[in-house]
Amino acid sequence: MINEDRLWNRLMELGEIGKQPSGGITRLSFTKEERAAKEKVASYMKEAGLAVYEDAVGNLLGRKEGKDPEAAVVLVGSHLDSVYNGGMFDGPLGVLSAVEVLQTMNERGVETKHPIEVVAFTDEEGARFSYGMIGSRGMAGTLSEEELVHQDKHGISIAEAMKAAGLDPSEIGKAARRKGSVKAYVELHIEQGRVLEQANLPVGIVTGIAGLVWAKFTVEGKAEHAGATPMPIRRDPLVAAAQIIQMIEQEAKKTGTTVGTVGQMQVFPGGINVIPARVEFSLDLRDIDAAVRDNVFQSIIERAQQIGQERNVKVTVERLQEMPPVLCSELVQNAAKEACKQLGFDVFSLPSGAAHDGVQLVDLCPIGMIFVRSKDGISHSPEEWSSKEDCAAGANVLYHTVMRLAMGE
Ligand code: GLV
Ligand code: MN
Ligand code: MN
């Protein structure tokens, strides 16, 4: 069994970094908060007896050697960045549990055939640049320098933020791992949904991860005087945007599985007595079936264009990022099932509605995830919570899953 108190104390300690007056956590990539979190976790990795290093995209790694130095590495981890005003478990639970697993192994003198590395991926959330999974894409070798043009709210690009953090954007290729060099990737994460709670179970095994598309909508009309412009002649992009957002809700609801969210909106020039000239808003659209999601996205674009024509405003849609839905490997799912049986937990499987770094690694290695029950299913919120007992249950399942993956052939 892992050390439940040590894991919990570290979770609470890490949860102080980036804490807002509201109680939520804002720890965006390449900021001093994220740096402080990485330093804190590096100190835990050293306590655990791991060799600590950072790769060319800023992924923080802690390595435990295997008996066979040539054997492919088992990767275990998650991320340390957060969304704006997020919770303290999304990401940190997976990183700290991985450290805890390796510390427990080292304390017991457990040696494995395969080396094992804990990874804290750079920018999983995509909160800062509306573009995410930078670290896992770097490791997969699919991140290109052209992608580093995406900017944050202040006009700082990913490349500029990397430079400010001491990284060289022209070197990102060095973070790529060779195919065959990674035996498997396994991540422990909070469920962020209500399925485990409703099933009254602390832990579940993930079957697959939903795919998402992120897009930016721009609606352009005509800025005029709010008092002197009669209603019939206005070309108001904000009213058109309101209609488009309602339509997005209708389209997403039609399938029964799709979810669509508008989480960002900016109105220009933003005066109380000015009809807006331009409105920009985001779309996050997801489904476990890529074809269903793409059909919904297509309908949304077509209907948005119609609304634009009816209201005499210009609607443009830019795709920002797209991730396919992926299935978790039999290798990791079976190892996790055996671990659950060994520990006396029910073997229960469920899909992930949220996206995770494993999506980016599927062409590099077999991937899999273990979920821990979330209180009321809430996440990406200061109210995010999982109990100490459930976190420990998940970390114990992770321990035995990693053991199986790292011992075997
Ligand atoms: C990450 O948490 C995401 O699913 O957006
Ligand atoms: Mn996460
Ligand atoms: Mn998240």
Image (cartoon, rainbow, N blue to C red):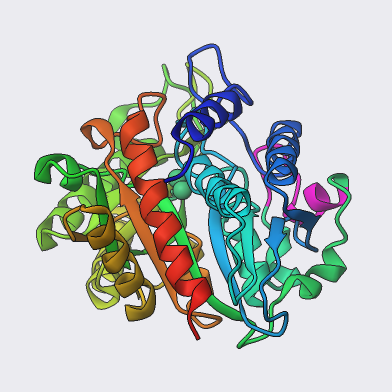
In the displayed structure, 99 sits above or below 61; it is: above
In the image, taking residue 139 as reference, residue 233 lies left or right, namely: left
Q: Is residue 18 left or right of residue 352?
A: right
Between 258 and 71, the one nearer to me in the picture: 71
Residue depicted at x 29% and y 34%? 378
Please state if 43 lies on the left or on the right of 181 as rendered: right
- Across and down, in percent, residue 209 comes to 34, 65
Residue 19, by quadrant, is top right
Picture layout, residue 350 above or below residue 66: above
- Residue 297 placed where, x, y %? 30, 66
Whether residue 161 is in magenta: the answer is yes
Q: In terms of image quadrants, where is residue 167? A: bottom right
Name the one closer to the observer, 3 or 238. Answer: 3
Query: Which of the four quarters of the rendered structure image does ligand 3 lie in?
Result: top left
Read off the magenta span: 151-163
- Let me know if residue 161 appears in the view: yes
Q: Residue at x 16, y 55 (%)?
A: 346
Q: Tell how many labels.
A: 0
Q: Residue 43 placed where, x, y %?
A: 74, 38
147 vs 383: above or below: below
Q: Is residue 212 magenta?
A: no
Left or right for 310, reference 47: left
